[in-house]
Amino acid sequence: MSEELIQRVRNVIANTQRIAVEKITIDSSFQELGIDSMDGVNILFALENEFNISIPDEAAKQIRDVRQMIEGVEKLLAGGVAGAAPAAS
C-alpha cells in the first residue's frame, strides 16, 4: 500500500471525526479512536467521495480498524472487489 493512500485515508478519518491526524496510525482500531458504527458510516461516505468508489455494505461491516479500511480502499481502487462500481457523480 502506498504512503499516499495511507495518508489520504488518515486525513479523511481525521476530518470526519475531528481527530488530530497524528493520533491515527495504520494500526489504530476504531475502538481506540472512539469511532462507533454511525461514525464509521460517515467515514465510509467520505471515503467514497474522496476516492470516487462505492464500498459494498457487506465489506463495510467487516472493517474494524484503519489498516482494514486502507486495504479495502486499495482493493476497490484496483478493481479487486466484485460488484464494486464507481460512485455516481
Image: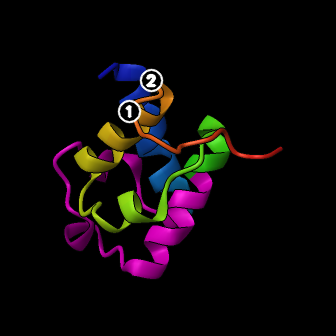
Tag 2 near tag 1, CB within 8 Å: yes
Dot 2 falls on a residue whose secondary structure is: loop
Judge whether residue 72 is colored magenta.
Answer: no
**How many C-alpha atoms fall within 10 Å of the one at disc 2: few (<14), some, or many (≥20)?**
few
Q: Residue at x 41, y 39 (%)?
A: 81
Residue 3: x and y in percent read: 34, 21
Q: Residue furthest right?
A: 89
Q: Residue at x 20, y 69 (%)?
A: 32
Dominant SS of magenta comes to helix
Please identify the quarter of the rendering in which residue 36 is found: bottom left
Q: Residue at x 37, y 57 (%)?
A: 59
Classify residue 76 as left or right of residue 1. Answer: right
Q: Residue furthest left?
A: 27
Residue 88: x and y in percent read: 78, 46
In the rendered structure, which amino acid carries the disc numbered 2? Ala
Q: 14 above or below 8?
A: below
Q: Which residue is mark 2?
A: 78
Please identify the quarter of the rendering in which residue 63 is found: bottom left
